[in-house]
Amino acid sequence: MDPFLQPLAQATTTLSTMSQPYYETMYILRPDIPEEEVETHVTKYRDIVVEAGGEVLDTQMRGKRRLAYPIAKHREGIYVQLNHNGDGQQVGPLERAMRLSEDVIRYLTVKQDGPLPTPRSLTTGASGAGESAAAATETVEA
């Protein structure tokens, strides 16, 4: 290899190992389901990804939000974002489970390129989710 191009090849190799593709699944749950059932769905979909050979990177509860247009006669929905890593084989079983669930009104999985997202701690319990929803409401109103 040309000595002039060698640093460029090393930088490209380093860059490709730093930014690997991962998957981001955003799904919307019906707004009328209780908090405990939301947590059940979150853990169910996390387990499906792990059983299919993927690795869950992060789960974020985005809270209840107004939809841009009605979906299945619902004007609001509970948004959940699931970031996961794997070879792509975990997407099929995950989306199949969401498609068959009556509580999921919409879902979308996107393959992301770039640095892996920094994992956040999953807030467990009703008080943590309520506080984050209240904080989001305060920032919108301000």
Image (cartoon, rainbow, N blue to C red):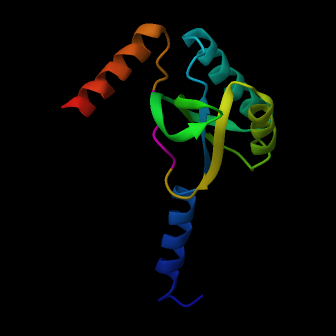
Most extreme residue toward the front is: 73
x 56%, y 64%: residue: 16
- Rendering coords of residue 62 (x, y %): 46, 30
- Looking at the rendering, the stretch of residues picked out in magenta corresponds to 116-120
Q: Residue at x 74, y 50 (%)?
A: 87
Between residue 122 and residue 102, name the one nearer to us.
102
Where residue 53 sits: x, y (%)?
A: 78, 37
> Which residue shows up at 55% across the image and 12% down it?
35
Spot occupied by residue 56 in the image (x, y as percentages of width and height)? 63, 34
Query: Which is more toward the observer, 6 or 42?
Result: 42
Q: Main secondary structure of the magenta part?
A: loop
Above or below, 127 against 113 in this view is above
Q: Does 130 appear above or below 138? A: above
Residue depicted at 50% across the width and 88% down the height: 3
Residue 82 visible to the viewer: no
As drawn, is 62 to the left or to the right of 138?
A: right
Res 13 quadrant in image:
bottom right
In-front residue for pair 80/113: 80
Say which quadrant the C terminus sits in.
top left
Q: Is residue 68 above or below residue 34?
A: below
Give the quarter of the figure containing the N terminus: bottom right
